[in-house]
Image (tube, helix red, strand yellow):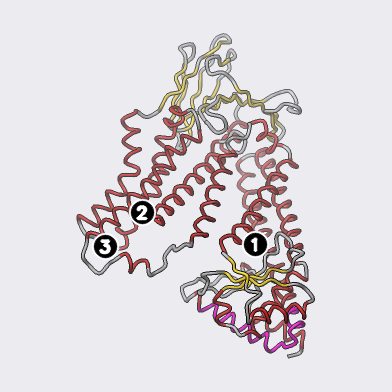
Amino acid sequence: MKRTAFICLLVAAFLTAAVMLIELVVRSPMSSPLILFDSSEAKVPKLLTGYSIYHGHYFLEMQRDTQSHEGRPLAFRIGSEDYQLKQIHPENVSLPAGQEMKVMTRRGIDVDISNKTSIQSNERSFFFNEYTISPAESETSISIQLRSEFGLALTLLIYFGSFLLPSMLALAFNHVFSWRPLFTLFFPFILAGLLPLLLNYHFTMGYGLLLTGSYIWSIVLCIFLPAFLAIALTAAIYQYTLNSEEDEVSLPEMEETGFLYWTRRETIGISLLMGGGIAYFFALFSIPLSVYVNITEKWYLFIAWYLSVTFMIMIVYTAGHRFIGNYENIGLQEPFASLKKAVEQACGTNVNLFKKKESRDETNAWVYTVPFASKKGINIYMTEGLMKNFTLAELQAILFHEIGHIKLKHGRLIFATTTCAMVAISSLMFFARKIMLGYGWGYYTFLLSISMVGVVMLMKWLPNKISKLFEHQADEYAVRQLGDAELYIRTLVKLHDISEEEEGEWTPKRKEWKETHPSLQKRIHYIKGLHGV
């Protein structure tokens, strides 16, 4: 039951993060190409209303500005044009004589405009409602009020249906009709993930924003809560169906598969990561608009922000793995104490051996190279599967390989390479965005394709290429310390065979350029070439 609730929370958190990411990409007045392109091409000022992205809903007037944008907190540049975001009061919107104005709201929110003007056109898309206000004979001040686009009855019907419909279908398929094909088993769960996202994001988020005046509360009420309830109720229906039937299907048999089995530490670690990720996204929406404008406008701030996110992910990843691993120090236990002593004498360095608990089905050994190695010694981590399947001599060969990564300072080189790659990627993203915004959709599409290829090369091919080089160097170090190339090659072959058996025949084979390690044949060829075996 606890596992089911945790999975429901995980799915709801993922959908929540997805909605916030969509909001940043689609509706943000600073990062959405949909808004920025249209504003750079339009000849009339644009009024953005009801977004609730930063501090509740607000009204922003976006228009060309003849003055320099330097020194003004809400000014930025698109191509050769300066733009100014002006936060205004909805009761007193100035409309110059003879000038049209476009008023944009998110889908789900309509506008009421005072009698002094009329709406020339009304365009609706999946994400936006756009109104063109006709010019007045003289400069006037108008009042704009926001209201829900959809009626209360329809909004409530969609809201409750988004999490009740999947569970009702599950009940009908399994209890009433007793249908058990794969489609009827999985279709309600698919709907439980999609309906709260699609229906509530489109139909009820606007009402939630107007009701709460807070973006964070509206997304919790309209996305997170319905998604959690939809998954939980659908899972409860299946639980009820299985418990009420007297056939051979039983929960203990299902649990024997080990599907989504997490230890207590893994559950805590994943929960912290999930909560931290959601908190980070929420923090983005609490940043003052003036700060957000500066980050997207100044290249050095954008790069600093990108690097800070990268380093935070690296630190969290390393700390999370160490916590979830639940390691036990085995360096004082025989026969590993003798193994530890032999390795230390050969390498001239203190070594600490740790066993990952509850890992009999894993065969692996590794070192954490970021942060850098501790002065107290090199910490090497092994799984129970590795210790069970390999002799002490073979384990010694594997330990020499891991020590090689530390001795050859691969951690520092990886850290420096990652930093350089992140600086290059963030610079590419910043200047590509500037160019594409200045020249329109055609350049946007072209540069986006080129940027994606560049990012893939920097993020996948280059680090993997360097990683393969490091593996060859660590192999060379291990053979030199071991003094027996044949033993090392036999260990590599054995490790490769066990790993392939654990992955199984259904695991798709990745292309070599996507792998972090060279192929077994290349590693053997490299070792034989160096030592003349």
Residue position marked by numbered label 2 in the rendering: 189
Looking at the picture, how far across and down is residue 26, in whole percent? 54, 39
| Dot placed on the residue nearer the N-terminal end, 1 or 3 | 3
Magenta span covers which residues?
476-501
Q: Distance between the residues labelled 2 and 1?
A: 33 Å
Tell me: residue 509, above or below residue 20: below
Looking at the picture, how far across and down is residue 308, in whole percent? 69, 47
Local secondary structure at mark 1: helix
Q: 373 or 224: nearer the eye? A: 373
Q: In the drawing, does residue 320 fall left or right of residue 19? A: right
| Dot placed on the residue nearer the N-terminal end, 2 or 3 | 3
Q: How crowded is mark 1: few (under 14 residues within 10 Å), some or many (20 or more)?
A: some
Q: How crowded is mark 3: few (under 14 residues within 10 Å), some or many (20 or more)?
A: few
Looking at the picture, how far across and down is residue 25, in whole percent? 56, 41
Q: 394 or 303: nearer the eye? A: 394
Q: What secondary structure predominates along the stretch shown in magenta?
A: helix
Query: What type is the residue that disc 1 sits on?
Result: Lys
* Residue occupying image coordinates x 55% and y 25%: 58
Query: What type is the residue that disc 3 sits on?
Result: Arg
Residue position marked by numbered label 1 in the rendering: 460
Q: In the drawing, does residue 432 fall left or right of residue 282? A: right
* Res 404 quadrant in image: bottom right
Residue position marked by numbered label 3 in the rendering: 180
State which mark lies toward you, 1 or 3. Answer: 3
Label at residue 510: none
Magenta region includes residue 136: no
Q: In the drawing, does residue 5 fall left or right of residue 458? A: left
